[in-house]
Amino acid sequence: MTAKWKEMHRASTLDKQIRELQVALSELDTVRPGKQTFIQRGRILFVEKAEIIANIKKGEC
């Protein structure tokens, strides 16, 4: 039962991460081309163009 619970918990966590990435991608799609936006990596914020961030996020899905 513990192994099954761990699998369900891991699947739930992965589903949550996938939903967060999908929301981030849909938000990036609304940004006008060429506009720079922030992306957080750990505790550091980077300024990148929206197209670059969208490509990074799509690679994470």
Image: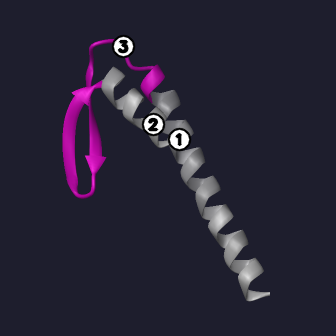
How far apart marks 1 and 2 lie (CA) works out to: 6 Å
Given the current orientation, which residue lies at the most extreme top position? 33
Q: Mark 3–mark 2 contact, CB under 8 Å?
A: no
Secondary structure of the residue carrying tag 3 is loop
Residue 50 drawn above or below residue 20? above
Secondary structure of the residue carrying tag 2 is helix
- Queried whether the magenta region covers residue 33, the answer comes back as yes
Closer to the eye: label 3 or 2 = 2
Is 57 left, or right, of 34 in this rendering? right
Identified by mark 3, the residue type is: Arg
- Queried whether the magenta region covers residue 20, the answer comes back as no
Q: Which residues are magenta?
A: 28-49
Q: Quadrant of the N terminus?
A: bottom right
Identified by mark 2, the residue type is: Gly
Is 18 left, or right, of 59 in this rendering? right
Residue 24 drawn above or below residue 12? above
How far apart marks 3 and 2 lie (CA) works out to: 21 Å
Identified by mark 1, the residue type is: Cys
In x, y percent, where is residue 53?
Answer: 34, 31
Tell me the tag on residue 32: 3
The picture quadrant where one finds residue 34 is: top left
Nearest the camera: 5 or 25?
5
The residue that mark 1 highlights is 61
Q: Mark 3–mark 1 contact, CB under 8 Å?
A: no
**Mark 3 or mark 1: which comes first in sequence?**
3
In x, y percent, where is residue 56?
Answer: 38, 34
Residue 1 drawn above or below residue 23? below
The residue that mark 2 highlights is 59
Residue at 28% x, 47% y is 40
